[in-house]
């Protein structure tokens, strides 16, 4: 048996996780997130969750850190930036219809975040305490613990904004039985009277400060199974996964984000060749985009989104575009047929 080591200090943890690009760390208590629990129940009752599972599936579990780690006492919360200082070139008009990917999904930013937090958890466990890392996992509401740990304030666009750094960050945490000094002061609101995100949301999904109607948020509209409501198809424009608009119009996040960037990876997948994707089998999509949230691993949902992009930005005189859409009008999946019919009508209207 190994002799227990002392609990690593929060300064040691902060320095340790820097190697994984984690720039901000805070600590809070592991008490039940009572307000967030009520909010989840209320929004679910009001239908704002729009059939989402995630933390809405079991709000009582996702707001109880002790459910995730028995005897939970402290939560170490971490943020890692994902904005890049430079962006990959936008494919030119001759490249055929290309679909835009949300910045947080150009590469897997959760992998290094989780790896850093797992490594730090191991250090804590050497002291004999329990410590488990979570990031974008339904075990805990990440923004709520980040807020409690004083890492940032809830923006009107619902994102957590870090003072001096903005919102282009992914969040994760370590839930532990170890006794750390908890943050006592939440970050003050920095949005002030700004309402740019309300005006910038293409579908008016921000229905009150910090409240997103999942039925309208394009990020979920593109992940949700089934047929995409007609009223949102034009707003999707060239997006295939994720929507950045409420952050791209946020003056704070845009300005301060430039101070907290990560290197642009040569593997970054910012644009998807929509026609190529529509030509490829499931395993090709899984291989490239399998880390996206794809409900029930139904890759036809990704094809459905690509058809909307083709309908919105495809060149009606391009034979490849027309042939692809015509092919999908004969597909065995009725949802794809319906989206291909829609795309064909859009192309016709523009020809
Ligand atoms: C479900 C989910 C979604 C859903 C619903 C989003 C939502 N706003 O609820 C969909 C699919 C739409 C989505 C989209 C996105 N998501 Co998301 N998502 C989640 C997930 C899995 C759960 C979030 C949750 O529980 N929401 C429930 C509601 C109740 O929480 P909330 O919206 O944060 O609401 C809080 C505020 O309203 C606040 N509040 C209460 N009263 C008031 C009053 C005022 C005045 C204000 C301002 C706030 C406020 O308290 C509420 C509870 O904490 C988390 C991961 C996790 N495990 O936590 C990631 C997470 C929230 N998502 C994340 C990201 C990056 C995104 C996108 C930017 C991705 C993209 N580019 O498309 C968008 C942003 C959309 C947006 N503006 O929120 C990050 C957010 C990082 C950050 N800096 O905030 C998270 C934390 C993942 C991670 N671990 O990094 N997401």
Image (cartoon, rainbow, N blue to C red):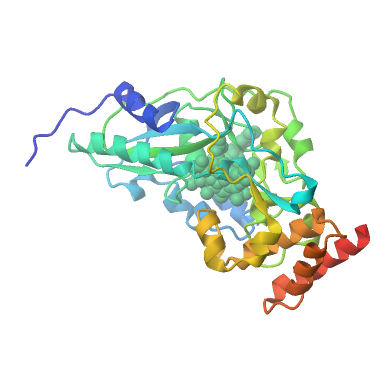
Name which residue lies at 74% across and 26% down: 194
Q: Quadrant of residue 249?
A: top right
Q: Nearer the viewer, residue 89 or 67?
A: 89
Q: Position of residue 60 (x, y in %)?
A: 45, 52
Going by the image, does 6 lie left or right of 348? left
Report whether residue 285 is seen: yes
Locate the N terminus by quadrant.
top left
Report whether residue 35 is seen: no
In this view, 167 is above or below 111: above
Q: Position of residue 309 (x, y in %)?
A: 75, 56
Quadrant location of ligand 1?
top right
In this view, 331 is above or below 124: below
Q: Quadrant of residue 25?
A: top left
Q: Position of residue 144 (x, y in %)?
A: 50, 38
Locate the C terminus by quadrant.
bottom right
Q: Position of residue 87 (x, y in %)?
A: 64, 34
In this view, 171 is above or below 50: above
In this view, 313 is above or below 23: below
Name which residue lies at 28% across and 47% down: 70
Name which residue lies at 75% across and 30% down: 195
């Amino acid at each position: 048996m190994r002799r227990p080591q002392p609990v690593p200090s929060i300064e040691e943890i902060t320095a340790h996780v820097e190697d994984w690009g984690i720039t901000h760390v805070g600590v809070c208590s592991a008490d039940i997130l009572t307000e967030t629990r009520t909010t989840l129940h209320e929004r679910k009752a009001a239908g704002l969750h729009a059939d989402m599972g995630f933390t809405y599936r079991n709000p009582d579990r996702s707001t109880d850190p002790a459910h995730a780690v028995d005897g939970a006492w402290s939560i170490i919360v971490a943020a890692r930036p994902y904005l890049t200082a430079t962006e990959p070139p936008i494919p030119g008009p001759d490249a055929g219809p290309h679909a835009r990917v949300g910045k947080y999904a150009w590469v897997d930013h959760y992998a290094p975040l989780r790896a850093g937090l797992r490594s730090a958890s191991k250090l804590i466990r050497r002291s004999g305490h329990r410590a488990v890392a979570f990031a974008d996992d339904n075990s805990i509401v990440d923004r709520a613990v980040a807020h409690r740990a004083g890492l940032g304030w809830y923006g009107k666009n619902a994102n957590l904004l870090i003072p001096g750094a903005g919102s282009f960050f992914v969040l994760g945490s370590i839930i532990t039985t170890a006794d750390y000094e908890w943050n006592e002061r939440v970050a003050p609101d920095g949005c002030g009277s700004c309402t740019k995100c309300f005006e910038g949301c293409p579908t008016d999904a921000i229905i009150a400060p910090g409240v997103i109607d999942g039925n309208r948020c394009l990020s979920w509209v593109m992940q949700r199974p089934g047929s995409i409501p007609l009223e949102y198809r034009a707003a999707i424009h060239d997006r295939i996964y994720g929507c950045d608009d409420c952050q791209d119009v946020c003056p704070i996040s845009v300005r301060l984000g430039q101070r907290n960037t990560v290197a642009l990876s040569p593997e970054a997948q910012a644009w998807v060749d929509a026609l190529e994707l529509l030509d490829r089998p499931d395993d090709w999509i899984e291989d490239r985009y399998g880390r996206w949230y794809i409900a029930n691993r139904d890759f036809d949902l990704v094809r459905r989104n690509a058809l909307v992009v083709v309908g919105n930005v495809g060149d009606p005189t391009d034979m490849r575009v027309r042939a692809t859409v015509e092919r999908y009008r004969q597909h065995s999946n009725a949802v794809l047929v319906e989206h291909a019919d829609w795309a064909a009508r859009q192309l016709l209207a523009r020809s």
